[in-house]
Image: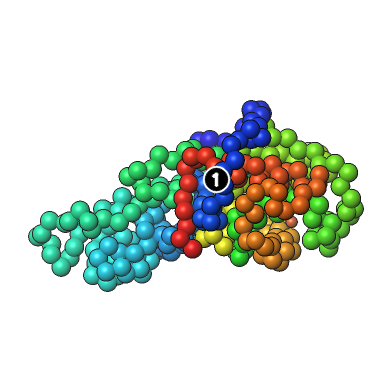
Amino acid sequence: MAVLDPTSSTEQSVSSLPYREPLPSDDHVFPLTWYAVMQAKALTTKPIKRTLLGKDVVLYRDHKGHVRCLEAYCSHRGADLSLGKCVDDQIHCAYHGWAFDQDGQCRSIPAHPDRPIPDFAHIVAYPTQERAGLIWIYPEDKRLASPPDLEVFPELEDASFTLSFYEAKWQAHLTRVVESVLDIAHLAFVHKKTIGRRLQPEIKQVRFSVPSSDRIIIENGGGLLDYVFPGQWMLKAAMGKSGFINYVTFTPISSHETLIFGYAGRTFLRKMPLMNWLFSKQSSKILEEDRLVVESQHPRPIPQALQMEAHVPADGPQVRFRQRWYQFLAYEEKRIMTKE
Ligand code: FES
Ligand SMILES: [Fe+2]
């Protein structure tokens, strides 16, 4: 089980990267990595459909509780498998009863029980795992995939934290969503009625470090904002002996829609269920303040080169993120392309 190591310190510069002309398709390219698709406790043996990177998938738990994920449409006549049902460890299509196992292999064609099952009857299966109360999918065919370890912040699996869940769906490109959580200067404006109400607009200095090529740590008012490329972020608030964190992870549904799953975590007042509700509500409210602005941004993804928007010193962490994103686009890192 991998956790994020806050002590790693491999500074990597991207300033010497060769320049590559942006491609029109860049808006549709995303890192191939683990993405959260739903809260784990919401998944039962009843199949459920989700969309990740423009692909519809069906998820269910088998009779042992293991999470399974297959492409959403049956290889026979394309019926939606989320209309089907889980029997033992297989999903049965609602239309003609074909049964598929956890690897997407077709195991039964009820209309022809005595005939061999053709190879082309299989459907794509995806690697899954359950971590930090979320279900994560690695969006590559299980037969080809060699997924990396999924790293999560240790606080999310630390029993001394009580986590209040929240989620949102934004009509925005992943890159714009990421930048919204690396932005210090917006707090006094977008969040002037909530977390930014005591903040001044002037940013004298943004103190941030880049302990590894995939990480940006920003010091903010005694707390830390810890971002891990491409889609995880945590606020670690300075609160003396008590602990408070706020976590979000971003999942591209398509090139223009992003899902956000979050937790507000605390080590105090843990026995008060009302506090769970309050923390979820407040976190959703703050996120909603961001949504209106982020959904308004044009172009929809970040522009394709640094010089195409104006930057000031307060934008330092975002510029660093852009450098990392352009590095991703320019190099042969594993990627996945959406059709929409
Ligand atoms: S469409 Fe699924 S069994 Fe026919
Ligand atoms: Fe914000």
Figure label count: 1
Between 169 and 162, the residue placed more toward the observer is 169
Q: Is residue 219 left or right of residue 74?
A: right
Residue 33: where, in percent of width, then height?
Answer: 49, 45
Can residue 88 be seen?
no
Please tell me in which quarter of the rendered image ligand 2 is found. bottom right
Residue at x 9% of width, y 60% of height: 114
Can residue 331 be seen?
yes
Residue 154: where, in percent of width, then height?
Answer: 61, 38
Residue at x 40% of width, y 48% of height: 140
* 66 versus 49 height, above or below: above
The outermost residue toward the bottom is 95
Q: Is residue 112 left or right of residue 182?
A: left
Q: Is residue 48 left or right of residue 18?
A: left
Residue at x 53% of width, y 56% of height: 24
Q: Is residue 325 left or right of residue 137?
A: right
Between 115 and 18, the residue placed more toward the observer is 18
Task: State which quadrant residue 259 falls in.
Answer: bottom right
* Colouring scheme, one of rainbow, by chain, secondary structure, one colour: rainbow
